[in-house]
Structures are given as structure tokens and as C-alpha cells.
Amino acid sequence: MARGGPAQPTDQARSVYRPLSPGEVKITGGLWATRAERNRAAAIPSGLKQLGEAKNLFNLELAAGRTSGQPVGPIFADSDVYKWLEAAAWEYGRKADERLLADIDGVVELIAAAQEEDGYLNSMVPTRDGGRYVDLPQHHEFYCYGHLIQAAVATARTTDRRQLLEVAMKIADHLVATFGEDKRHDVDGHPVIEMALVELYRETGTAAYLELARYFVEARGRGLIEGYGFQPAYFSDRVPVREQTTVEGHAVRAVYLGAGATDVAAELDDQELLAALEAQFAAMVDEKEYLTGGLGSRWEGEAFGDPYELPPDRAYAETCAAIGGIQWAWRLLLATGKSSYADQIERMLYNGFLAGVSLPGTEYFYVNPLQHRDHALADTQRSVQNGRLGWFDCACCPPNVMRTFASLEGYIASTDAGGVQIHQYVPGLIDSGDLRLRVETDYPWHGRIKIIIEQASATATKISFRIPAWAEDATVDGAVVEAGGYATVERTWQADDQLVLELPLRPRLTAPDPRVDAVRGCLAIERGPLVYALEKTDQPGGVAPDDLAITADAGFAEREQSDLLDGIVVVTAQGKVIDRATEQPGSRPHPRPAPATRDTELVAIPYYAWCNRGPQAMRVWIPTA
Amino acid sequence: MARGGPAQPTDQARSVYRPLSPGEVKITGGLWATRAERNRAAAIPSGLKQLGEAKNLFNLELAAGRTSGQPVGPIFADSDVYKWLEAAAWEYGRKADERLLADIDGVVELIAAAQEEDGYLNSMVPTRDGGRYVDLPQHHEFYCYGHLIQAAVATARTTDRRQLLEVAMKIADHLVATFGEDKRHDVDGHPVIEMALVELYRETGTAAYLELARYFVEARGRGLIEGYGFQPAYFSDRVPVREQTTVEGHAVRAVYLGAGATDVAAELDDQELLAALEAQFAAMVDEKEYLTGGLGSRWEGEAFGDPYELPPDRAYAETCAAIGGIQWAWRLLLATGKSSYADQIERMLYNGFLAGVSLPGTEYFYVNPLQHRDHALADTQRSVQNGRLGWFDCACCPPNVMRTFASLEGYIASTDAGGVQIHQYVPGLIDSGDLRLRVETDYPWHGRIKIIIEQASATATKISFRIPAWAEDATVDGAVVEAGGYATVERTWQADDQLVLELPLRPRLTAPDPRVDAVRGCLAIERGPLVYALEKTDQPGGVAPDDLAITADAGFAEREQSDLLDGIVVVTAQGKVIDRATEQPGSRPHPRPAPATRDTELVAIPYYAWCNRGPQAMRVWIPTA
């Protein structure tokens, strides 16, 4: 059983909630169990194969002196190997599997052989790109270290192996000896080392690692990154972290930095820094987050846009950014105990993240737009018109998805001195030590969540349920509880005691922030945690969503379809088909004559399931009729 | 006096109208005279200086063996020199200036010295990028040739010098010997060579140049460009030109190709090809052109988006693309005689093009969005938040602007067997041989255009006025004429005869195509050929345009302000200030409560003049209250 999950604050840390180890939570059925099993059985093996074919492993063999040639691929190619390794390690913690362990051992041995005497490790930069640390903003050396360290911590927490942890400590010691306030003053262009070093401190107790993480957080925004094509905002380097009031620049970088800075703030109980990070996250949610939890509205620089710049069609919303958003939200949730962060994890997980992977689990989207037009053209590999792909030239997303599925149990529940908190609703088992619970639910399809006490201590203990902000009229054992917060029941529990939480899962219409110019005059359909989308193939007559409008005051119907897209609830609503033939193209004098319309039924599926029947037109935000 | 302008069809070409040479048209006052004079006095000299500082000239000196070192800058750096040279040549045609001619001579001599024995000429590719023609899709060798040839034709038409034309012919002969149906089968990633070769054929009579241009047009879309990161659509290489029905991919490439293919179609009287090009241009106007005439909605790939993907904030709308759009429209106008092409030139010239250059004429926008939010961040050099810049790392736009100002007279009027056509209204002189006209007008500020006959032949001659499609209730000598077409008056003219065209310049509201999701629920203000914009500094109380809405049925007022922005007509309209403090941020359940508003006056200036008082919030499309 795993000794700790992906973020494990020390006892000294400011942590309102304490995470349960993945091994203390089991997901036993439902949507996430199905998808995690596919991740185990299909995606992780396929990932190792892809790392071979894309030459990532070859590069490490080169660095280990086991073969000859020139390294190939993007400069951060090593990191894909490390993310895969982290996925494999968490997966081994979920289900011990000797073949998987052998795969892990093989890759770890290769990595150890590629490490240089003083701890430096990179298969590309020294031979191909001009030498170690010559271009930290672009060369991603710490970024690769960060992912290696995260993988090492995962292997230490789920296996009896120590080799990768030793490699990681050698790297960290080398970094501590080389960088810092009174040494070389520098930061990496792509954060992740911050989270990793804090976790390595948590695993090893070496305070210097925490101190270096703190340094890397504090050194940002002080002019260290200059003149690299993109301006400092791209690197989250325009403003010191504790003075920053929003997120900006490259989205994955920004949220990884936010997560790492939150780890630092928690361990040092730095309340000023934590408050700044809470404000940044809040600004992100209000001004720069898609309804799906997608983050980053610009293709150029894979970046957050200006506030309210949220185009649905050209949303970048990189799968990795949703993953980083979940990691950041989880750390803020632990540090502050505020349910809104768990709400955000739910939104990102069920929508922005889950859309990034095909139902079979082995194909991935890099970008996750909220609208895709009929007859769209693919002009780059990342275009969704290509469908989800098995791998990418820049393959950061696939192994990131794998490690997220494999560590999902880490985000479900937590404890504090008084009891247990359930943040996400999945069928399964939660064991907090004092209390063992079984959760029975068909969530997110049905809102009934039954908790059965399997074992309890003799003292009064609290069970807290997150009540999502959207869950008006939720009840616990029949009593209405307030939306947006935790509903807590304290009792001296007996085995077989039960509690029933009802989250009313009605389809609902959501209006965008009026400042979001790109979706003015549109509404979206949501149901529970799921954002819905219109996909062309489902519409009567095969009408493209481009030509549909929604009747804003119309009612909904819903139907379960177990044969469709792994089993979903389909939502239908009244709408209109716009007869484009009655409309003159182009801009025209105001007022334009209204085009002819006819009634239709809009058929909506969960956004995450789109593009599993071929690339086709889709939209989340629907113009009002 | 210039012997031919920038596109000079032969007598054999299909050409409903024949261009007047720049020397046969003089712009004697008004907006364009002012701006062209600044181009002459400030921009062109500044351009030569920038070419020195940015090392473009140094690269050519290297290639000429006059100095030593390594070439620097983007791979197409030579083309900036050639575009500057073309600007200088046209400018010399407008106003002979010995110092300018000496500058031209110096640069031409350098270029001639850099040319290799067999005609090959490139200062970067052979020494730095792996050798000649190893990567035509990326290396821009023909693109550079194209701009050199255009410059050479300009020097031949405006000066007595032949050296650059000889260099150009040597290049063209070398290309003819190397590429084609029965030789090396290849095309360049970036079109422009097509237009250039046709013009060189027109100038020299060498049919092989026309044939090679035809080959380059026909060879596109047949799989020659593959596997270069971007997919074929980016290179306008997905579909053969005569089978294409729209524009796609990199916008400048697409419109340059369209212009060159139109030249080929005109010279060969290829009506099938011409019809395809007309359809492509029409699709562009209806589905992919901004209200400003801006072309290209994506930063990624500087590309056209899918149909109706026209975000105002992230509009790329590269200044060069508007210039290419003007070049293409002019060629279609000559070939077909349809006024809609002249309407498009007007739209692009007064808005998408003119916004690309500062009022003093020496600073440039690379991109031309239709909306810029308050507190926007600059994250790349091209961000409009940086203001217009004197030069760019990729400096294609500045010399492109220069050559456009310097050859503007070429786009004003034309002739046919029956008379003269006036396409654009500027104060000046038009001499078609049979007829000499003086045009008096304050257009675009006032709609009165007076034509005075200065000299006429004894036979009946037609004078045709373009009546813009927006010009409802236009009159010629008091008689109402139809909007959208040419109003023609045929007479045996006498000196001092007069005609008065009145184009009613009322502010008007324009509604977008309802399929353009990004500006749903918005209206724009136009007046005559000018698109208007709200800039923050002009609004009462300095309210950012982000917080303004327009009252859709409200009236307008206008006022002339000679002291503002070189002298403009300001348009005001009734509107509302939205009190954002009364509004919850983020997406919310429908219906959201409406925020509080208060009445205000919206103050609009011509879009082209924005950002001449510092970077600030601006918008063209205004939400309706």
C-alpha cells in the first residue's frame, strides 16, 4: 500500500486537511474505475512502447553510453519518460504487478546509468544544445529534473525500490550545491522543480530541498529571464510570485508554479504567500478559466490570454494545463480547507481533463476547444480535426494523463483531527484509520450517494460531504444542506450505519460572464459536474451545431443511454435550426433581417465524450434563439 | 514619369480595365498625400537605416565577399532589402531625388555583387542553412527572388537604371533553367515569385517567365510540400489552385498566391482559373475577412481560420496581408471590371492597411486586432500593447508599407477603350491621355467629389465613378445613382466642364454576419470607407471600451476635429456604461441578473488612427445595450 500520495504535507505544514494515501482510498466502480483500468491495461503499456518508438529511451541509452548516435526529439524529451515512470509507479501502488515493476526497474536502471558523476542528468542538452545550464529559460533541464523527482517520490511511496530516489537526491544535492541565493542565481523557464523539491523534502526530510524550492519560487519575477523571444510574462517571470494578482503567460508553467509555490507556502506556513496564491487562483477562475476548467486561451505561447479573452473555438486549454490546475487546486484545498477548490477539481477532472483522452484511453487531445466548426481544417498536428492521437511530436500530455489516472485516489478524500472529508464522489472505499466507509453511487449520472460505515472507532467522528456550488436543494438524509461548502455529520458511528447524500442532477442552463466577448448571447448546458456539448452526429437531420440555437426558456429532457459512449445521460432541449440560405453572408447594415428558423431538438452529450465518433462539429456555448 | 505601375497587363491579357501609370495619376492633397509625403521624407530613409542596423545589408556584403562573419537574422532577411528598394524606386518615380537614386544605386550594386555566377542569389541559405534549394518550403529563396524581381521592375519603370533588372533576369533565367515541368519539380513555401515573374515577363517580353509563373501556380496543391511541421493547408498547398474554393493557411502566402495566379490567368486569358480565383476571393470576403479588411484570424501560423472564425481581440490581420489583399483585389478589378474589388481595396486601404502605420509614418503594427482590452499584457514583440514599433525581428511589414504608399497612385484610376474609371477618391490629377481631370475633394471626411476637366479630346468619352456598396443615395450632378457599381457619364468633354459626385457620408451601424460567433450581439460604427473604433482616452470619464455598450436605435452626431489625430471626423453615439461592480464574475446560472448601467456618450475615431496616443483599450465591435 502506498505511503503517501502525490502531495503529502509534513506534520509541520499548514494543512487544514491531510491527504489520504492512494492506498487508503479505492475506486471500485463507475466511470473513473473503468477509465483507470484502461489506463492500467492499455495506456501505460502503450506509453512505454511510444517512448521507445519516439526515441526518448534511445536518448537515455546514448547518455548512458550504451549506444551511439545523436539524440532526437524536443529538448524536454526526458521528461516524458519520467512522467511515464511516475504513472507506472502510482499504478503499481494501485495494483502490484511484477511485469510492470520489471518495466519500471529497467527504465530506472537506464536513467541511473545516464546520470553524470556530479548528479547532472540530461540526455540532450550537453551533447546537442551547447552544454549544461547554458540556456535555462529554454532548455528545460530543471523541468526534466522535476518530473524525475516526482517519479522518484512515487516509486518510493509505492514500491520497495530506492534507486530512482537515490538518483533524485543526487540531482537535488547537485542543484543545492549549484543554485541559490549565494550561488548561481537562476531559474528554469518551465516550473515544476518547485513542487518536486518540496515533495522530495517531504519524503527525505532534507531541509535544503525545501529551501531551494523556496528560492526558486522567490527568484521568479525578478528579471532573471530576459530576451528569449517571449516576454517575461510568458515565463511567469514578470512579477514576483507574492506580488502577482493573476495568472499569465504559458498556462502549464503558470499553474505548475502556482502548485509548487503553494507547497512552499504550506510547508513554511507563509500566509502572505498563500493569500497571494489564493488571489491568483481566484482571478484565474473568474477571468481566465473556461467553463470546462480548461486553462489557456491562446495557441501563441500556449498561454493565458488577457482577462475575459476566452474564445471557445481557439481555446488552447491544453490537457496538461487542466492537470496542473487540479494539482494546484488540491494543494490549496489541503492548505485552506475551502470547498471551492474541490469544486474546481471536479470541474477540471470531469471536463477539461477527461476530454483530453479517448474512451479507450490510448489517444489524446493536446488542445481542448469548446467549439469545433463544421468543415474545419487541420493545419497542425495538434488540431482537433485530426482526432485524438496516440502520441505527439511534443508528447507532454499523454504521460501526464497516465499519471493522473494512476493517482486519482489521491484526490478523493482527506482527514483532519475531527474526521474525514469526502471531496469527490466515486463508488469505493475510504479508510481514514478511525473510520472505514463504503461509498455507493452512480455519480455523475445519478445524484444519490450512499455512505455505509464498515468500521468505526468508538469516539464521535465527523463525516463531511462537499456540496458543490451548483447543487441547489442537496439533502443529507433528507435534510436540505447549503450548496457550496461542506455538510458535516458528527456521530459515534457503528458498523452498517448509513448516510444518504442527494445531489440533484438536473440539467441547467449556464450564462457566461458578460465580459467574455467571445460567447456573448450564448448559453451552455450543464448537469451536475458535467458540461454538455452538441455534437453534429447526434442532431436530428445531422444539422451542424453551427446552425443551431437554443430556446432560453425551454425545458429539458434527459435519457440514459447505456449503449452510447460507454454509457451516458443524454440531455435534450428545445432549439431552432437557422436556415442559412435565407441569410446574406458578411457584415450588413443594421438591422439585418432575421433568418428563417424551424424548431428542433438539441441533443447534448457530456463534453468529455466528444470526438469519440470521428472529428466533427461540436459546441458547448449555444447561441440563444 | 513612370512607365507602368505595380501591375501592368500586356495588350494580350484579359484586362477589362488598363491601369494608369503612377505618373499619370498625382495625389495632390488630403490624407493620402500627407501620409505618402511622410513615407517619402521619414519612412524610406529610416528604412535604409534599419536595414543597416538589423544587418540585412551586412548579410549581402558577406555574400558579396566584401566583409567576413556569419549572416544574422531571419532566413528571408534579403527580402526586406528588396521591398525597401521597390519602395524607393516607386518613390523616385513620384519625385525624382538624386540622393534617393544614389541610395538605390548603392544597394543595387551590393546586390549585383552578391549574385552568384549562375544567377543564384541569397545571403543566408548557402552559408548558414545547408545549401541552395535544400528546403524550399522553409528557406524562402524564391520569395526573396520575387521581391527582388518586383523591385527590379519598379526601378526599370521609374529610373533609367537597368542593373537590377539584369540581376532579376539572371535569376529568372536560372530559375527557368532549373525548375519546371520537365526539370526539378518543386515550389517555394512562400508565394510571391508568381506575381514577380509575370511582371518581369510584362517588362521584358520573355515568355519563359510567364510560363514558369504558370508552372508554379499549377504545381501547388499537388503534394510537393510535405512534412514541414505545418500541414499543407498552411502553405496553400492542400488543393490545386484551380480547384480551391476558399483561402486557407498563412494569410500573406494565400493572398500573394491569389494575386500571382490572377496575373497568370489574365495573361493567358484562362477563364476557368480566373473564375476559381474570383470564387476564392468572394469566400474570403464573406467568411474570413474582418470588417477592417484585415485578413488572417490566427496567430498560430499567421493564418486564416475556419469560416466565420473572426475573433476581434486575437485577430492577427497582419499588415502585410492587407497589402497582399489590395494587390489581389486590384488584379481582379483589372481583369473583371467589377466595382466590388475596388470597394475591397478601399476597405483594406483605409482600415486594415492604414492602421498598420503610425501617423508619423515610421512605426508599424505587425498585427491589427479589432479589440484591445484594458490592462492587456504584451507577451511577444508583436503585441499591440507594445505600441507600433520602428522595426521587428521579422521586419516584413515596414518595407511593405513603404512600397504601398510609394505606389498608391497605381490603384486610383484606370482606362478602357471608352474612357476613364475612377476607383478611389483623392484630390489630384488623372491623365488618361484622352482626358485630363482634376479631382477636388475632402474625402473621406466629406462626400463631395468635384471633377474638373482640364483637357479633353474631341470625341465622346466616358467618365465612370465607383459608387461604393455602402453609398446609398449617392448622386452625380444631383441625379441619384445606384450603390455598388459604376456610374458613368459619357460626353464630349470641354475644358472646365465639371461633374459633382456626392457620396453621403453618414455614420452608420453595421451588423456582423450572425455566423461570426466572436462578435455576436455587437454592432460597429462606420462612416463612408472608414471603420470607427472606441478608444479609451476619448470616452467620458476615461471608461474603458470593455465596459461600454451601444444603444442600437440611437442617433449619431459627428464633429470635425482638425486638431485631433491629423484631423478627423469624430462620431458620437448614445451608449451605456456597465457598472461591473454590480455584476458577479464568472459563469452563473441562467438568467444572470442584469448589471446596473448609466447613460453615456460613445466617442468613436477612425480605426486607422488608434494607438497614436499610447497603447490603450480599443474596440470596433460594440456590444448592444
Image (cartoon, coloured by chain):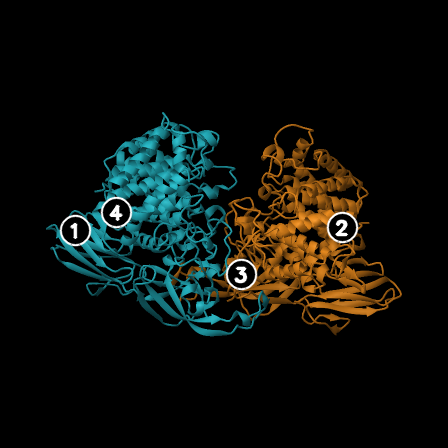
Chain colours: A orange, B cyan
From the image, tell me which residue sits under label 3. A308
Return the x and y of residue A168 as percentages of the image width and height. Answer: 73, 42
Q: Earlier in the sequence, mark 3 or mark 2?
A: 2
Return the x and y of residue B444 as percentages of the image width and height. Answer: 29, 60
Chain of the residue on which disc 4 is drawn: B
The kind of residue on which mark 4 rests is Val
Q: Residues within 10 Å of mark 4 (few under 14, many from 20)?
A: some
The mark closer to the camera, 4 or 1, is 1
Chain of the residue on which disc 3 is drawn: A
Q: CA distance from mark 4 to mark 3?
A: 49 Å
Return the x and y of residue B369 as percentages of the image width and height. Answer: 44, 55
From the image, tell me which residue sits under label 4. B16
Residue at 31%, 35% in the rendered image? B106
Determine whether, in the image, residue B475 is placed left or right of residue A363. Answer: left
The kind of residue on which mark 1 rests is Arg
Nearer to the camera, A150 or A217: A217
The quarter in which the N terminus of chain B is drawn is top left
Q: CA distance from mark 3 to mark 2?
A: 38 Å
From the image, tell me which residue sits under label 2. A202
Mark 1: secondary structure: strand
